[in-house]
Amino acid sequence: KMGIAKRLAEYLVETYNPASKHGSIDLVNAQYDTCHENPARPPGFFCDATNCLDLEGHSGVGLYRGETALHMSIVSNLPRLESLLIQHGANLCLRAIGNFFIPGGNCYFGETALNFAVSQGRQDAVELLVTTILDNVHEHTGWRLDEEIEAVFRFVTQTDSIGNNALHMCVVHKHTNVLDYI
């Protein structure tokens, strides 16, 4: 059963990715949209990033707004899918801001993919995300240590809407074991 789901996920990612010939469909970075702001889309429908980046607070945004396949794969502990999504252009900085993820609740994971990985104690996912940032820096600038350090620092210290970053999430969720990977 999981083999069929995996093959379907791989097909969808490979067919509808940012570099796809199929137009503007970007399944990899589609954010869950539970808002009612766009009457053309029913609640709970996936939308593109331009329609779901309202960071004006949590009221009225719905339960899962902003969550992406990368967020879901991290929480579901699916490392192969995480790698596949990143390989096909997953945006590591998109935020899950729905009411399901608000601070103080059971599922406060810090909005970003890195914070989700830290909140789950997923050393492998943290390492994958940080390595991806380093690979991107290498690709664009070569082997400049100062730019590598700055890029990782910016990535790790990126805060959620209440000011918490990956280091805070290590403490909040008692997963200090991932500190070595940050």
Image: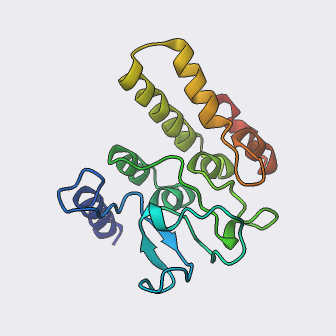
Q: How many marks?
A: 0
- Which quadrant of the figure has residue 109? bottom right
- Spot occupied by residue 44 in the image (x, y as percentages of width and height): 50, 81
Task: Give the residue at x 30% y 64%.
Answer: 25
Q: Nearer the viewer, residue 82 or 102?
A: 102
Task: Give the residue at x 25% y 50%.
Answer: 19
Task: Give the residue at x 60% y 64%.
Answer: 54
- Which quadrant of the figure has residue 150? top right
Say whether residue 173 is left or right of residue 146. right
Q: Nearer the viewer, residue 69 or 181?
A: 69
Residue 113 seen = yes
Q: Nearer the viewer, residue 155 or 167?
A: 155
31 is higher (above) or lower (below) than 94 = below
- Spot occupied by residue 152 in the image (x, y as percentages of width and height): 58, 29
160 is higher (above) or lower (below) than 37 = above
Q: Say which quadrant the C terminus sits in.
A: top right
Task: Give the residue at x 68% y 78%.
Answer: 60
- Which quadrant of the figure has residue 75? bottom right
Q: How is the image coloured?
A: rainbow
- Spot occupied by residue 17 in the image (x, y as percentages of width and height): 29, 56
Q: Say which quadrant the N terminus sits in.
A: bottom left
17 is higher (above) or lower (below) than 1 = above
